[in-house]
Amino acid sequence: MRFALGVALLTAGLSFFLLPWPAAADVLPSRPGAPRRTEKERIAADIERRGVSKGESAAQVRAMSARDLDYFAAAPGRVQLAAGMPVEDIIIGGVLLAVATGIAIGVAVQGSRP
């Protein structure tokens, strides 16, 4: 009886861990078409107009996937420069860090009192 129970539990355990694997299998999408050369040139020109050098913009466009190129080619306004964090985000982050530190210190001081 113990052997049958052990086999049943082992089977249930393996089923629990092995059955979900097919659900996590990789799904390979269909092969995207090659982007047109004019799209690449237009996107590179949009990046250059925003102040990036010609060589760097060409390198960025070469690194883009076909999906990325389609996304940026659909609407030229989507091309934007991302250059670090705005000052407002740095200030807000510093305030939140100071508040969290103050709360942690307050909790530590209250916990150390008899």
Image (tube, rainbow, N blue to C red):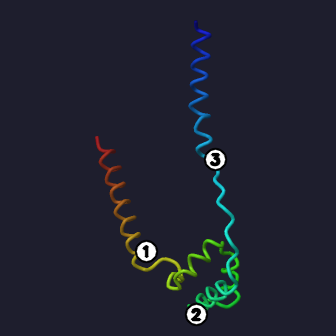
Q: How far apart are marks 3 and 2 (CA)?
A: 42 Å
* First-in-chain label (2 vs 1): 2
Q: How many labels does the image show?
A: 3
Q: Distance between the residues labelled 1 and 3?
A: 41 Å
The vertical placement of 14 against 34, above or below, is above
Answer few, some or many: residues within 10 Å of disc 1's Cα (few below 14, many 20 plus, some between 14 and 19). few
- At a point 62% along the width and 77% down the height, the residue shown is 69
* Residue labelled with disc 1: 90
* Residue labelled with disc 2: 49
- At a point 37% along the width and 72% down the height, the residue shown is 92
Answer few, some or many: residues within 10 Å of disc 2's Cα (few below 14, many 20 plus, some between 14 and 19). few
- Left/right placement of residue 66 relative to residue 5 reads right
Based on the displayed image, in which of its 4 quarters is residue 32 positioned?
A: bottom right
Counting from the top left corner in percent of width and height, residue 95 is at 36, 69
Quadrant where the C terminus is found in the figure: top left
Amino acid at pointer 2? Arg
Q: Is residue 83 visible?
A: no
- At a point 33% along the width and 56% down the height, the residue shown is 103
